[in-house]
Image (tube, rainbow, N blue to C red):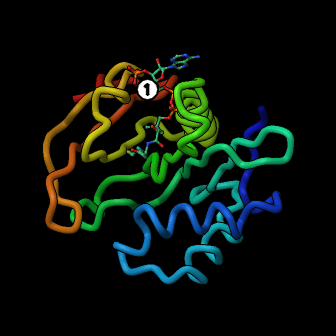
Amino acid sequence: MTIRPVAETRHVVEIGGWLHATWWAAEGWTLPATRAFLRAAAGPAAPISFVAEEAGRPLGTATLDTEDLAGRPDLAPWLASVLVAPAARRRGIGTRLVGHVEAVAAALGHRRLYLHTMDRSAFYAARGWQALGTELWLGRPTVLMAKDLPGATHPAG
Ligand SMILES: CC(C)(COP(=O)(O)OP(=O)(O)OC[C@H]1O[C@@H](n2cnc3c(N)ncnc32)[C@H](O)[C@@H]1OP(=O)(O)O)[C@@H](O)C(=O)NCCC(=O)NCCS
């Protein structure tokens, strides 16, 4: 399995469809705008959207984003849009994608990464993330979490 920017692959249309159907449409993005974001999110700085692929097939995606929660524009960058194809789950791909985004963020000099999740806080807590509190995403409660990256000089909290 390899992890690369989606923009460098043939998977922009498919990953765009996944993200649009899962979260982005609810946030008001059109499908063409979602795909345009993925084509542009090629790095080297955030936003960068990644795809995990195996034998030419996309298995999952994650994004190092500059914003992900309308109510917290003060926080950045974000680990966002982590999604693994249902048939590929529980093989460690989600963990690899999360670790990849953490490593890229650290290599770019970021000292702290944020995410929010409505129902996967245990998954992230088991991978070193700390819950900071509850925020709202489209009017629904979501857990804000943070992780200090290698080189950080202050503890999460
Ligand atoms: C959350 C999500 C990204 C996890 O992806 P994944 O590829 O299944 O993640 P992993 O395989 O790394 O880990 C999932 C679990 O499988 C376990 N696992 C990993 N490899 C395994 C293996 N070979 N055999 C059995 N279990 C395994 C992990 O220990 C983990 O258990 P835990 O949740 O109790 O910690 C995926 O379930 C998903 O896309 N969900 C829907 C979207 C979503 O909720 N995204 C997150 C929003 S913030």
Where is residue 112? Give x, y as percent: 41, 37
Q: Report if residue 106 is visible in the image.
A: no
* Label 1, ligand 1: CB separation under 8 Å: no
20 w.r.t. 91: above or below: below
Would residue 21 be found to the left or right of residue 18 on screen? left
Q: Is residue 145 above or below residue 44?
A: above
User: Which amino acid, by three-letter code, is at mark 1?
Assistant: Ala
**In the depicted view, which residue is nearer to us: 77 or 144?**
144
Which element is circle 1 on? loop
Query: Which residue occupies 85% across, 47% down?
Result: 56
Observer able to see residue 62: yes
User: Horizontally, is 115 left or right of 77 in the view?
Assistant: left
- Say which residue appears at 60% left-offset and 83% top-offset: 32
Please identify the quarter of the rendering in which residue 42 is found. bottom right
Give x and y (percent) for residue 58.
72, 49
Q: Is residue 70 above or below residue 103?
A: below
The quadrant of the picture occupied by the C terminus is top left
Q: How many marks?
A: 1
Dot 1 crowding, Cα within 10 Å, few <14, some 14–19, many 20+? some
Residue 115, image quadrant: top left
Q: Return the residue at label 1.
A: 152
Specify the quadrant that holds the N terminus.
Answer: top right
Q: Is residue 37 or residue 88 the one in the foreground?
A: 88
Task: Report the residue that reaches farthest toward the right.
Answer: 55
Residue 44 horizontal/vertical position (percent): 71, 54
Residue placed most toward the observer, 76 or 124 = 124
* Image-quadrant location for residue 145: top left
- Looking at the image, which residue is at 51% across and 23% down? 150
Instruction: Name the residue located 42 percent from the left edge and 40 percent from the top edge.
Output: 113
- x%, y% of residue 123? 36, 28
